[in-house]
Amino acid sequence: MIRIAAVGDVHVDKDVVGRYRPALEQLPGVADALLIAGDLTRHGTVEEARCMAQEFGDLGVPVVVVLGNHDHQSDQQDAVTGVLQDAGLVVLEGEGTVLELNGHTLGIAGAKGFGGGFAGACASKFGEREMKNFVGTTEAIAERLGAALRGLECDALVALTHYAPVPETLTGEPLEIYPFLGSYLLGQAIDSAPTALALHGHAHHGSERGRTPGGVPVRNVAHPVIKQAYNVYQLLSDEVDAGLVSI
């Protein structure tokens, strides 16, 4: 069994330091790894990244993250990534990593993702160059995510994004902003590999549970949705829901 703790949209700044830490220090007893689904900071500054590293560093379990849109706000995303990596966090963008946990291997492929919408109500790569660039950005990210997922050899495979791969976990958000919260192309990438679980954030007013068209369980772990420091999910267990439960 592998136990995965997950949260997103923690938006750490200096006034947040210490808020998550009491629960985080309990992680070695309840989970084997922590995955964070983007929006690690408020405005994507190096100073906020240092606060994030202080809050989520040295936890006694591996920490794997993707960036979110907030982490790009100040155009310092490369420096933010460097600060987090220096603190021992694994930052993924169109890449994968494999962790050895409890005698099993956990593969994690991560990407921020991007918008575009979902089947029947999505943007198309047609018309103005600006629209082509918008959709092309999502296509490129989804292609890299899918390739990373398919390239991992592991016992259990997880997709980690910030933007949503399905509309079900957006329920509660205004329909008008769905195209800015995720894309069906991310769901297709997830379905292109034997993915056991997909985690995302971004949708603060969304709902927790969904599935890709291929049947992969999707969980929105944005902090305002789960309302706690993290949820824990079990993989490679004999529990219901294809070996996946929320503790």
Image (cartoon, rainbow, N blue to C red):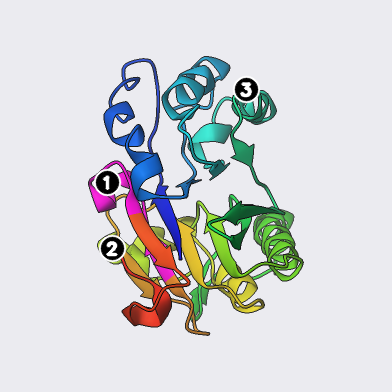
Q: Tell me the distance, in whole angstroms, between the alpha carbons under discs 1 and 3.
A: 25 Å
Q: Tell me the distance, in whole angstroms, between the alpha carbons under discs 2 and 3.
A: 32 Å
Q: Earlier in the sequence, mark 2 or mark 3?
A: 3
Q: Identify the residue position indicated by label 2 in the image.
A: 207
| Magenta-span inclusion, residue 203 | no
Residue 104 appears in view: yes
Q: Position of residue 180 (x, y in %)?
A: 47, 56
Q: Nearer the viewer, residue 17 or 246?
A: 246
Q: Quadrant of the C terminus?
A: bottom left
Mark 1 or mark 3: which is in front? Answer: 3
Amino acid type at circle 1 is: Pro
Amino acid type at circle 3 is: Val
Q: Residues within 10 Å of mark 3 (few under 14, many from 20)?
A: many
Total number of numbered discs in the rendering: 3
Q: Tell me the distance, in whole angstroms, between the alpha carbons under discs 1 and 2.
A: 10 Å
Q: From the viewer's perspective, is residue 72 above or below residue 30? A: above
Q: Which residues are magenta?
A: 218-231
Q: Identify the residue position indicated by label 1 in the image.
A: 224
Q: For residue 246, which quarter of the picture? A: bottom left
Residue 201 appears in view: no
Q: From the viewer's perspective, is residue 247 above or below residue 84? A: below
Q: Position of residue 208 (x, y in %)?
A: 30, 63
Q: Identify the residue position indicated by label 3 in the image.
A: 83
Q: Position of residue 83 (x, y in %)?
A: 62, 22
| Magenta-span inclusion, residue 219 | yes
Q: Residue at x 73, y 71 (%)?
A: 150
Q: Earlier in the sequence, mark 1 or mark 2?
A: 2
